[in-house]
Image (cartoon, rainbow, N blue to C red):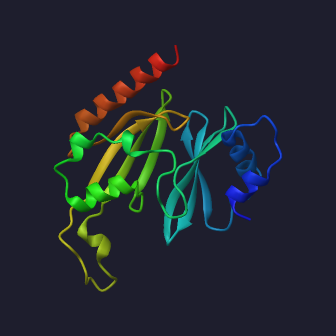
Amino acid sequence: MSVTKKVDALNAPGKSIDEKLYMVLSTMDFTRNGYRVSELGEGMSVIEQVIWGWCKQRYLIDNKNCRAYEIMDGNMDFVNFTIDDIDWDSIKQLPEKAKMRAQEMSAQFPTFIRGFRKGVAEVSWQLNPDGRYYMDEDGFGMTSDEEITVYGFIDSEMNVLVKFQYIDEDWKRLDKMRREAEETLKKNSK
């Protein structure tokens, strides 16, 4: 039975969907069937699942508050993020393919929630892989594509604190985004 069906079937009156999802996931054996659990710090972890041969982060787990959040579905589309969580001005110069994947909320290519620090985690979302992604084992099929990654910051409930932006490897800007996320979290918790 799928996780979604188990959550729907769970008789837990008064529990939110996030609490029910946590209850179901906390009873599953992730040592087999293409799953693994990775720690993100601050009581947070992520459940990864092999989808189409790739290890993808599927669920964010808040062990302190006994809640879980679906990151992406089995088709590798984001579940909790929307097009409103994207800074469209920062990506307007990107190739059409990358903008289309952002519009579709596709997390097909490497996408990671990084470790939590001060209640905030960086999310890197690759909109386009470099050309080697398309290459076969004999070296054929490589394209001239460049890797394109956007970054955003979330809290432990998957709320976007700083919208996804293309930073063109300006790591100082990424640091500034983290500080902005930390400040937003402080304001929101007052």
Which of 30/68 is in front?
Answer: 68
| Image vertical order of residue 186 relative to residue 94, above or below | above
| Image vertical order of residue 71 relative to residue 14, above or below | below
Residue appearing at x 21%, y 74% in the figure: 143
| Image vertical order of residue 103 relative to residue 185, above or below | below
Q: Position of residue 155 (x, y in %)?
A: 49, 33
Image quadrant in which the N terminus is located: bottom right
Which of 124/39 is in front?
Answer: 124
Residue appearing at x 23%, y 77% in the figure: 142
| Image vertical order of residue 57 relative to residue 177, above or below | below
Identify the residue at the far bottom of this view.
Answer: 138
Q: Position of residue 59 (x, y in %)?
A: 58, 50
**Quadrant of residue 167 in the image?**
top left
Residue appearing at x 80%, y 50% in the figure: 10
Q: Left of 144 or right of it: where is 120?
A: right
Q: Position of residue 188 (x, y in %)?
A: 48, 20
Q: How many marks?
A: 0
Which of 169/84 is in front?
Answer: 84
Q: Left of 91 or right of it: where is 76?
A: right
Residue appearing at x 67%, y 32% in the figure: 65
Q: Position of residue 116 (x, y in %)?
A: 49, 35
